[in-house]
Image (cartoon, rainbow, N blue to C red):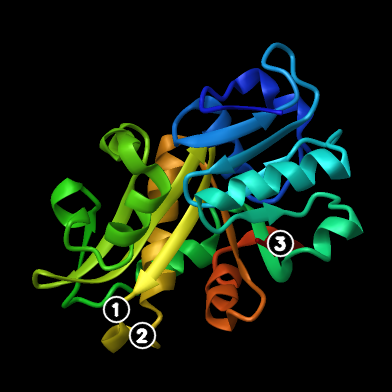
Amino acid sequence: MLSTTELKSEWGPLFDQHTPDAPVLLSLLSGRCPGVAYVDQIVKPTQIVVRAHGGETFASVECSEAFLQESLSLASQLGPSFLIDSGVPEGILACGRVIERVHFSDCDLESEALQALRQQLPSHLEARMLDQELLERCEYAGCTLPKLYGDKLNTYFDFGYGICLLDREDVVCEVYAGYVARGHVEVIAGTAEPYRGQGLASIAAALFAEEARRRGHNLTWSCRTENVGSMKIARRLAFRHERPYRMVFF
């Protein structure tokens, strides 16, 4: 087994083309975010396991159980790894902790629901595009994006974007692109604790969706099934498809 940090977009067809969290995988293979790959051979590999800097891990469809087990053992030395289940062998599932999740995709960016949400922005709040200065004040993006992008964080704003809601100068809600690849955006949201329960994340997400539409992107959203609040927000956002999947924690 060999490892490399030089991931390649031509490896894409070796993976499940309908895998949940596809923007993460595609961002990895395009070199937008850092990661490591374990391969059976450098030139034209047939078995590949890739781990993002943030821990998300994907296995190509032809991975043997033995190859996957060894790759996960190596990947876990870098930190917690979260294998996306696209047909994981039972022997692998038994070695980790299975987390039930739900994936939302194909948002109707022209929907009346999104238009109505955008009109609900409270008059005392200001919506502002995420930038480097705001990032340093964001409770969620300011913590998450450095973990996802590591030493490539300085390139994030070449393709990434977000919306912040501010109460004067305080960031009270954030919705931002975790990953962007091939016209799809994995959305991440967070609301400061004193402002929760007011629907602000739904409003900010609707504003974010308008920016995504302007850029020619569509949205994906995923969360644990136990995160009822996150699923509630997603179901307000006119996603056409919703499906459960599993992530295996190592």
Give the SS element for disc 3.
Answer: strand
149 sits left or right of 114 in the view: left
Q: Is residue 151 above or below residue 44?
A: below
Q: Residue at x 13, y 51 (%)?
A: 133
Say whether marks 3 and 1 touch (CB < 8 Å).
no
In terms of depth relative to the viewer, which is nearer, 153 or 182? 153
Q: Is residue 203 above or below residue 158?
A: below
Query: Which class describes the residues within 10 Å of circle 1: few (<14), some (14-19), or many (20+)?
Result: some
Say whether marks 1 and 2 touch (CB < 8 Å).
yes
* Sequence-wise first label, 2 or 3: 2
- Tag 3: amino acid: Val
State the mark number for residue 192: 1
The residues bearing labels 2 and 3 have C-alpha atoms spaced at a distance of 29 Å
Residue matched to label 3? 248
The residues bearing labels 1 and 2 have C-alpha atoms spaced at a distance of 7 Å
Whether residue 162 is visible here, answered yes or no, is yes
Q: Is residue 186 above or below residue 17?
A: below
Residue matched to label 2? 196
Q: Position of residue 154 (x, y in %)?
A: 26, 36
In terms of depth relative to the viewer, which is nearer, 188 or 166? 188
Q: Position of residue 221 (x, y in %)?
A: 57, 59
- Tag 2: amino acid: Arg
In terms of depth relative to the viewer, which is nearer, 96 or 225? 96
